[in-house]
Image (cartoon, rainbow, N blue to C red):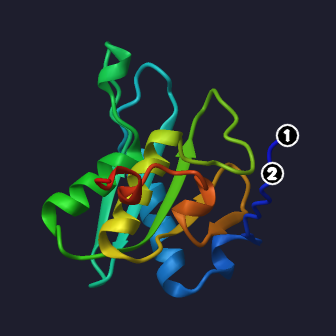
């Protein structure tokens, strides 16, 4: 029998975006703005992401669907890749993620898919800093996670591919 590994994730619950500090509130508002511009004609599930860089710049992303479903891309990766393409040496401080749909309930806690979590972890390792993640669904509440590694505790990372 294996050893039990206990992992705890700390998620802060905030009543609403109005109760966030000014920077976090702006980031959530930008994610909502980005979701409105998503290209989601197939799912009608618009996701927006806003990435805050260490220099204060905010980069937006939204989901981009395609009739060939696997060819689309999630909002989080659109924003993260755009930020890295535009300012590759500037660390990412935070990302706000939200979704909107007239047909689907987004629920209380919206969480990034595994691929997006892995990309966030890669940027944490690349810049040697945690990325705060702000998650907002249909409710007013905002959930804050201090690191992508909290959402993907057994992530694949550079230490896993070091030569022997």
> Quick check: 43 above or below 9?
above
Residues at badges 1 and 2 in contact (C-beta under 8 Å)?
no
Q: Is residue 149 found left or right of 93 in the rendered image?
A: right
Q: Can you tell which quarter of the image residue 68 is in?
A: top left
Neighbor class of circle 2 (other Cα within 10 Å; few <14, some 14-19, many 20+) is: few
Query: Which dot marks residue 105?
Result: none
> Quick check: 63 above or below 33?
above
Q: Is residue 15 found left or right of 147 in the rendered image?
A: right
- The residue that mark 1 highlights is 1
Q: Can you tell which quarter of the image residue 145 is in?
A: bottom right
Q: Is residue 161 found left or right of 105 in the rendered image?
A: left
Residue 91 screen position, x and y as percent: 30, 75
Q: Residue furthest top?
A: 68
Q: Residue furthest front?
A: 164
Question: SS of the residue at dot 1?
Answer: loop
Residue 1 screen position, x and y as percent: 85, 40
Q: Can you tell which quarter of the image residue 55 is in?
A: bottom left
- The residue that mark 2 highlights is 3
Residue 78 screen position, x and y as percent: 30, 47
Residue 90 screen position, x and y as percent: 23, 76
Neighbor class of circle 1 (other Cα within 10 Å; few <14, some 14-19, many 20+) is: few
> Quick check: 117 above or below 101?
below
Whole-angstrom CA distance, mark 1 to mark 2, is 7 Å
Question: SS of the residue at dot 2?
Answer: loop
> Quick check: 68 above or below 136?
above
Depth order, front residue of 3/133? 3
Q: Is residue 65 found left or right of 130 in the rendered image?
A: left
Residue name at image x 48 percent, y 56 percent: 32
Residue name at image x 40 percent, y 67 percent: 124
């Amino acid at each position: 029998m294996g050893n039990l590994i206990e992992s705890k994730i700390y998620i802060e619950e905030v009543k609403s975006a109005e109760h966030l500090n000014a920077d976090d509130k702006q980031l959530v508002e930008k994610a909502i703005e980005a979701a409105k511009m998503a290209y989601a004609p197939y799912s009608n599930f618009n996701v927006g992401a806003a990435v805050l860089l260490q220099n204060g710049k905010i980069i937006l992303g939204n989901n981009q669907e395609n009739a060939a479903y696997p060819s689309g891309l999630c909002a989080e990766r659109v924003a993260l890749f755009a930020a890295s393409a535009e300012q590759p040496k500037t660390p990412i401080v935070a990302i706000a993620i939200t979704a909107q749909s007239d047909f689907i309930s987004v629920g209380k806690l919206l969480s990034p898919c595994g691929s997006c979590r892995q990309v966030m972890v890669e940027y944490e390792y690349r810049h040697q800093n945690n990325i705060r993640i702000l998650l907002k669904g249909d409710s007013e509440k905002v959930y804050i996670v201090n690191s992508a590694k909290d959402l993907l505790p057994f992530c694949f990372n550079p230490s896993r591919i070091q030569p022997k």
